Amino acid sequence: MTPIEELLTRGELTVRGRIAEASNAVLLCTVAYEGRSAECVYKPVKGERPLWDFPDGNLAQRERAAYLVSEATGWGLVPTTVLRDGPYGEGMVQHWIDAGEPPEASLLALVDGEEAEEGWKPVAFAEVGEGRTALLVHADDPRLRRLAVLDAVINNGDRKGGHLLPAPDGRLYGIDHGVTFHTDDKLRTLLWGWAGEPLTEEARSVLASLEAQLAEDGPLTTRLAELITPVELAAVRARVALLLRNGTHPQPSGQWPAIPWPPV
C-alpha cells in the first residue's frame, strides 16, 4: 500500500461539500491520518443512480478497477482510488487533483475549416449555432494517446473533455470511470484522433505486460476478480488480445454513439 493509498483508506473523512453538477452523489472531503491530510472525492454507493445496462456491481467498484488497470500499465493515468466505508457507507474515495488549466485550453478545441492543423487530431464536426459547424480536435499529445489505449482496455463509455485533468506538474489524469468494463463494445470518447492508426511501440509493450498480468493466476486478475464479474474480466482479456493482434487503435463500431453527450 502506497502512502497516499494508506491515507485515503485509513484516514478520517470529513465532508466539506457536494459537487452539484455531478449526476451521482459526489462529495468533496478532506482525509487525515497520522499527521497527514489531503483533499479527496468520496462517491458513496448509496448515492449512485441505477443503470439498466450496468446491472452488476456498482460504479465505485468499476472506478477502483479502472485505477488498478491504470497502475498496471505503469502510466499512472487515474488518481489514486480506493474502496472504503465513509460517513454515508461504502464508496469510492479518490485523491483530489488540482487541474492546472481547463482541458480545452490546451487539449481540446473547436476550429474552423475541414482539416486539423499540425499538432492536432480531428475527431468530428459539431454544430456551434446559427447553422455553423466547427471541427472538434484534440491535441496530438502522447499523454492523451496513452489514455486512449487505457480507455480501449477498460471499455470506457464516457470519456468527456471534463474528465481530463492536466496537473500543474505536467501529468495528465482521467477521472469518472464508473461506466467501464462492459462486455459489449461501449467505447465512447473524444479521443478518436488515432482511430485505425498503428499503436506505438510503448503501447504494444504495455499491452503485452497487461496480457501477462491478466493470466488466470496473474496479479491483476486476482485484484479485478473482486470488483468485476468473471465475464467482464474475460472481456478485458479479449480486448487486450484484440488490440495486440490488430496492432492499431480501435475505430468506432457504428453500433453505438461514438462520442459522449455532452462532449465536455
Image (cartoon, rainbow, N blue to C red):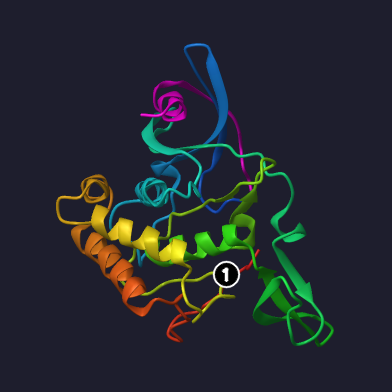
Q: To which residue does mark 1 refer? A: 191
Q: Where in the figure is residue 113, as x and y percent of width and height?
A: 80, 85
Q: Residue at x 58, y 57 (%)?
A: 143
Magenta stretch: includes residue 141: no
Q: Residue at x 45, y 80 (%)?
A: 256
Magenta stretch: includes residue 11: yes
Q: Residue furthest left?
A: 217
Q: Where in the figure is residue 212, as x and y percent of width and height?
A: 24, 56
Query: Does residue 116 appear left or right of residue 40 in this picture?
Result: right
Magenta extent: 1-20
The image shows residue 11, relative to residue 163, as above or below, that is: above
Relative to the observer, which residue lies in front, 106 or 180? 106
Q: Where in the figure is residue 94, as x and y percent of width and height?
A: 49, 38
The image shows residue 38, relative to residue 161, as above or below, that is: above
Relative to the observer, which residue lies in front, 202 or 27? 202
Say what secondary structure mark 1 lies in: loop
